[in-house]
Amino acid sequence: MHTPDRHPRPSRRGFLAGTGAVALGLSLMPRDLFAAEDKTLNFYNWDTYIGETTLADFEKESGIKVKMDLYADNDELFAKFKEGNPGYDLIVPTNDYVERMIAADMLSPLDHGKIPNMSNIDTPFQDAQFDPGRKYSMPYMWGTIGIGYRKSKVKGAVDSWKAVYDSDTHPGKISLLGDGQTVIGMALKYLGYSLNSTDPAEIKKAEDLIIAQKQQIKVFAPDNGQDLLASGEVDLAQEWNGDILQVMGEDDDIGYAVPKEGGLIWQDCLCVPKGGAHPGNAHALINFILDAEAGAAIAETIQYATPNAAARKLLSKEYNENPAIFPSDDAVAKGEAQLYLGEARTRMIDEAWTRIEAA
C-alpha cells in the first residue's frame, strides 16, 4: 500500500513572512571547495522549500547553475532512486528515509572537510540517532506534529492526544492526517508507548483506538487539514506545525499545541546520493545553505524551525519565540523521531492502516 508522506505538499509551500528576505552579503565559501566539475548541479527538493533567492545567490557566488526538480513526498523520492540515481546531485529526505536510503546503499558519505559551515549547526543537531556522526546527512529544517484547533470552539486547553483520539466532544469535526504511519504513531504516543513500537499487541491497541474513534472523525486529510480548520469544517486538526502556521498567520482564532504525551519530531536533511555527477558542487551548496545569512533567508521565507544556530541569531524575536515553530523543551524531550525499523514493521503498520480505512 502506498503510504502518503508525513509532510504533505502544503508543508513545503511554506508560509511567506512578507518581511522580505534577509539581506545577503555573500562571500561564503573558499574557492577550493568547488571540485573540478562542470558548473551545474541537479537538485531534487520539495516544492518551494528553499529561500526566494537562495539558488540565484549561490550561482552568483559560485558560478554553479542549479536545476531544481520537485517531488511530492518521500515515497516518490525513494522510488525514483530504487533503480539507481536518475541524475541528481543533492536531495532532501526526511530522517527515517535517510536511514532507509543508507540501508539501501543509496547515499554517499559526506566530506565534512568541505562543509566548514557545519560549525553553525546547533549542538542537538550535530549528531543524529538515524545517522550517527552525521556521516550521510546535514540537517536542513525540523518541526513537529500536533493539534491545530479553533480557539472559540474548544473548552480548556488542548493539551492531549485524547482530544482527537478518545473524545466525543467534537463529533464529525476532527481531522487526522491521511498517513497510517503518523496516525498510528500518535495513537501509540497517547497510549503511553513509543511511536516506533514494534510490538504487535501495542500496534493492535492503537488500531482499535482509531477504529473506535472513526465515527467522530470527519476525514483522514491527505494534505488539507489546515484548510479544513481555516474554513470551519473541523474544530481540531492533527497537522504538521508548518501547515497550521500558514492559517494561524491569517486567523487569530486558530492555535497549535504539541500534546503533553509528546509527538513526532521530524527532520529534513541534505544528502548526496550515490552516482551523482557533481558531488563537489553538492557539498558546495550544502555549505552555502548552512551559512548564517543564507540559512536565515531560507528560514524567514519558509517559516520552519532551522537547526542553524548562527542563522537564528539573525532572525526576529517573533520567529524565534513562536511556539508553533520552536516547541517547548518539554515537548521536544517527550517527542520522538520516526525511525526506519525494517520492511516487516512497515508492512505491519500498512496492514493495520488498511484495516482502519476499511472499518
Image (cartoon, grey):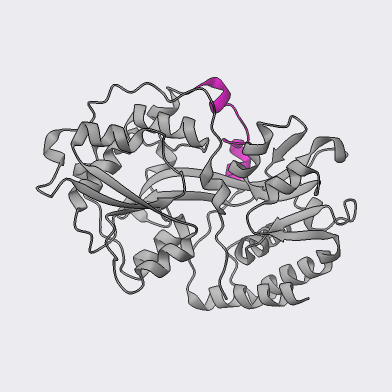
Residue at the image point whose x is 49% and y is 69% from the top: 341
For residue 247, side relative to residue 332 (left or right): right
Quarter of the view holding residue 187: bottom right
Residue 349 in the image, given as x and y percentages of width and height? 61, 72
Farthest residue to the left: give it.
36
Task: Tell me which residue sits at (72%, 72%) in the image.
Answer: 357
Which image quadrant for residue 254? top right
**Toward the viewer: 254 or 189?**
254
Is residue 58 toward the left or the right of residue 17 in the image? left
Assign the C terminus to one quadrant of the image.
Answer: bottom right
Total marks shown come to 0
Q: Is residue 146 magenta?
A: no
Q: Is residue 328 magenta?
A: yes
Which residue lies at the image location 82% right of the left edge and 64% below the top edge? 213
Residue 19 vertical placement versus 48 (above, below): above
**Image position, residue 13 (x, y; %):** 52, 44
Report whether residue 271 is seen. no
Asked where in the image residue 100 lies, by quadrant, the reply is bottom left
- Residue 300: x, y in percent? 48, 30
- Which residue is painted at 44% across and 61% down in the image? 97
Q: Position of residue 247 (x, y in %)?
A: 67, 37
> Does 189 sit above or below residue 316?
below
User: What range of the chain is rendered magenta?
Assistant: 316-333
Question: In the rendered view of the protein, which quadrant contains the N terminus?
Answer: bottom right
